[in-house]
Image: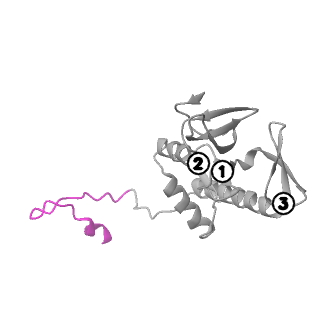
Amino acid sequence: MNNPFYLVDPNVVLITGEYDPYGKLCARVMIGRKTILVNQSPLQLLDSTLKYISFTLKGALAGAKNILGNQYMCPIIVNPFQGICLFPIRSPKKEDCIWFNPDHIVKTKAKGSKTVVNLSNGLSMIVDLKLHTFNSKMQTAIQLKRIVCERGTQAFSVSELPSQNHIELKTNAATGKYNFDSLAE
């Protein structure tokens, strides 16, 4: 059954693409040990979640690339308020791309040229990536989350006007606009 509306939350372990019986690409979302099929592609689901909090997938990707450098297959912050970060293991445009939440990865280990990923729900899965590559993607996501969290809680210093010297802004009679240049004096 396809869920008509769903938002990514901190309990999401991973998201991947799966076709429904009608051939539509949907998002298979793992929440704990359960999964649901959402009636949106993984990228649509991520974008819907971001739009719900007034962001966009395009903006999340641009922000992540600005912080991490212009890298391919960048992790994204899906919800900065809840600290949700996901990273793709292959091109997000591919239907079999898996988006992992690094908070739910307990351990990784090599199995030949693949990686065994032990998840917080007690399940493990084998992904078709070398251990070093998978761990590098995971560490980049953790780094992005840390930087965004630090930036979101930093106090930015701004010049303060002395509280005793209140200035009243008046409009210019000729233009009807406020004269902000008077503040520079």
Disc 1 and disc 2 in contact, CB within 8 angstroms: yes
Q: Disc 1 designates what residue? A: 86
Lateral position of residue 138 relative to residue 59, left or right: right
Amino acid at dot 2: Val
Marks 2 and 3: which is nearer the front? Answer: 3
Res 184 → quadrant: bottom left
Amino acid at dot 3: Leu
Residue extent of the magenta highlight: 164-185
Comparing 8 with 152, the one in front is 8
Q: Main secondary structure of the magenta part?
A: loop
| Mark toward the start of the polypeptide (2 vs 3) | 2
Residue 78 image offset from top left, x and y in percent: 58, 48
Q: Disc 3 designates what residue? A: 131
Does dot 3 land on a helix, a strand or a loop? helix
| Real-space CA distance between mark 2 and mark 3, rounded to the nearest whole angstrom | 25 Å
Q: Is residue 11 visible?
A: no
Q: Is residue 113 visible?
A: yes
| Real-space CA distance between mark 1 and mark 2, rounded to the nearest whole angstrom | 7 Å
